[in-house]
């Protein structure tokens, strides 16, 4: 993308309504615009990040055999009356009446709808286990929407639901998702630590929240420093292997981690003092073993192995995709702007032309740009170098490729790594070979 043609509105002023870093940076870098309290429009750069995260989420869900569907945002109130949650959910639910006085709601989550769809289709234990997921906008009328997209009212979530005939099967699904989540977050470039959690209004008994460690987090967290060093992408674990799932459980059992809600002083005392870390965390996902709560309430059965009807045992698995965009920035920025992990950056390279109009500089930039336009944001504006450097640091693409008249003449490319600040010069061909 050429910056002269891009819809990439950076702001010079820090918007006053934004109180935390990620919110300020997202507005300043032109990722989102607020359109109403807690409701945001995603601009091209922000949307590219949202899509990159979604792709990783999909790949890791598909890898463990979950199947993608797409359920609507609007749901009928009657569906929620069947589970008893229509009244129980309270004022966070946005209730809507259509022209025929039918009651609808903008979905805050989808247990009822998926259970209903499942019940209408699946009849036998032979069709299980089954995990379905979707990525869809949710609405929760938060009392205090704040922190930008991190606590919006409309937000983008991946929610998945598993069905099995037995509790053991449901627990296996749970640990498979645990592994998929650990991999997903690692690939996205954040350290999201699984912590035992309360199940709240969703119900059930086994649950973990995934928290990104960052000072702006709303939850207090207590964890073993060992969590800072675990790279799940390097562990060759297979969700189909019972042994590997056990290994995951062992890691969780060995290294303490809990939010303030579940913090256990006695267990904390057993963590070596120099390993104890206290801080704040941002909830970016949560998984639950639900049991037959929804299938019982909604009267959904399948034929069991012995021929009698049985209520399938469920799990549900959420990831806050839009919240993650803010959480990544909270965990990865400096005074100059965002530092995107490579895997979710809106573009990989910022190509900075220091002298538009200089023939050799323009020609080299054009050559580099045409090699990979999809992954390059080309700053071809007639602006001062300082403005370009500031904007490049603010948007935080992983690599800055800096071309001026001197380098262009010598056939040299200057490369800056946004995260480390390290600069190096290399011949154009070396650059093309390394990054092409
Ligand atoms: P919170 O405790 O922050 O209110 P939650 O526990 O109510 O979140 P869940 O029902 O577990 O949320 O939903 C799954 C995920 O959706 C959360 O882990 C979070 O990442 C995301 N999420 C929840 N509420 C919001 C929101 N208002 N804005 C953005 N993302 C959200
Ligand atoms: Mg909530
Ligand atoms: Mg929560
Ligand atoms: Mg939660």
Image: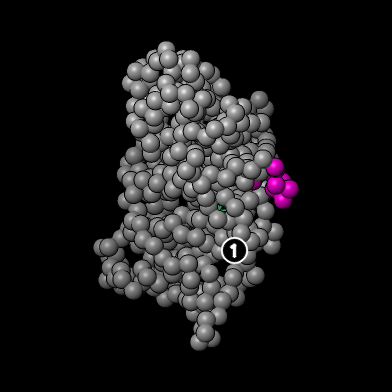
The N terminus, quarter of image: top left
Residue, disc 1: 140
Residue at 35% over, 22% down: 432
In this orientation, which residue lies closer to the viewer: 330 or 251?
330
Q: Is residue 146 visible?
A: yes
Look at the numbered disc 1 and give the secondary structure of its residue. Answer: loop
Say how many tags the image has.
1
The chief SS type of the magenta part is loop
Q: How is the image coloured?
A: one colour
User: Toward which corner of the image does residue 119 lie, by quadrant?
Assistant: bottom left
Q: Position of residue 436 (x, y in %)?
A: 34, 27
**Position above or below: 133 against 358:** below
Residue at 43% over, 18% down: 408
- Queried on whether the Cβ of the residue with tag 1 lies below 8 angstroms from ligand 1, the answer reads yes
Can residue 14 be found in the magenta stretch? yes
Q: Position of residue 185 (x, y in %)?
A: 48, 41
Please report the bounds of the magenta region as a residue range.
Answer: 13-23
Q: Is residue 163 visible?
A: no
Q: In the image, 338: left or right of 398?
A: right
**Residue found at the far top of this picture:** 410
Q: In the image, 273: left or right of 250?
A: right
**Position above or below: 278 against 313:** above
Can residue 1 be found in the magenta stretch? no
Q: Position of residue 412 (x, y in %)?
A: 43, 15
Q: Residues within 10 Å of mark 1 (few under 14, many from 20)?
A: many
Q: In the image, 98: left or right of 336?
A: left
Residue at 53% over, 52% down: 42
């Amino acid at each position: 993308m050429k910056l002269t043609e891009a819809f990439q509105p950076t702001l010079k002023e820090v918007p006053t309504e934004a109180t935390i870093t990620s919110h300020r940076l997202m507005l300043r870098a032109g990722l989102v615009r607020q359109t109403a309290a807690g409701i945001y429009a995603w601009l091209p750069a922000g949307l590219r990040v949202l899509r990159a995260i979604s792709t990783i989420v999909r790949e890791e869900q598909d890898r463990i055999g979950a199947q993608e569907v797409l359920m609507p945002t609007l749901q009928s109130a009657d569906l929620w009356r069947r589970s008893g949650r229509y009244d129980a959910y309270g004022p966070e639910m946005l209730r809507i009446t259509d022209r025929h006085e039918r009651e609808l709601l903008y979905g805050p989550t989808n247990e009822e709808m998926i259970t209903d769809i499942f019940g209408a289709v699946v009849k036998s234990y032979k069709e299980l286990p089954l995990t379905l997921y979707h990525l869809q906008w949710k609405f929760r009328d938060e009392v205090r929407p704040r922190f930008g997209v991190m606590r919006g009212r409309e937000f983008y979530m991946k929610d998945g639901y598993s069905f099995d005939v037995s509790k053991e099967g449901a627990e296996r699904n749970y640990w498979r998702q645990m592994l998929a989540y650990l991999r997903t977050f690692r690939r996205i470039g954040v350290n999201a630590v699984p912590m035992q959690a309360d199940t709240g209004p969703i119900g059930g008994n086994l649950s973990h929240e995934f928290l990104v460690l960052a000072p702006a987090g709303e939850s207090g967290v207590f964890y073993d420093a060992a969590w800072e060093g675990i790279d799940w992408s390097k562990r060759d674990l297979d969700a189909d292997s019972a042994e590997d799932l056990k290994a995951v459980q062992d890691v969780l059992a060995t290294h303490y981690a809990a939010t303030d809600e579940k913090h256990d002083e006695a267990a904390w005392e057993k963590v070596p003092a120099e390993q104890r870390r206290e801080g704040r965390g941002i909830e970016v996902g949560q998984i639950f073993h639900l049991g037959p709560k929804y299938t019982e309430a909604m009267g959904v059965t399948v034929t069991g192995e012995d021929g009698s009807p049985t209520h399938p045992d469920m799990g549900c698995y959420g990831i806050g995709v839009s919240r993650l965009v803010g959480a990544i920035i909270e965990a990865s920025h400096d005074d100059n702007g965002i530092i995107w992990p490579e895997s979710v950056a809106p573009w990989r390279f910022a190509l900075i032309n220091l002298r538009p109009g200089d023939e050799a500089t323009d020609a080299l930039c054009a050559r580099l740009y045409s090699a990979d336009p999809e992954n390059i944001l080309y700053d071809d504006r007639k602006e001062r170098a300082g403005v370009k450097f500031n904007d490049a640091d603010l948007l935080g693409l992983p690599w800055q490729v800096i071309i001026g008249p001197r380098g262009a003449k010598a056939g040299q490319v200057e490369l800056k790594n946004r995260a480390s600040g390290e600069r190096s010069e290399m011949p154009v061909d070396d650059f093309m070979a390394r990054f092409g």
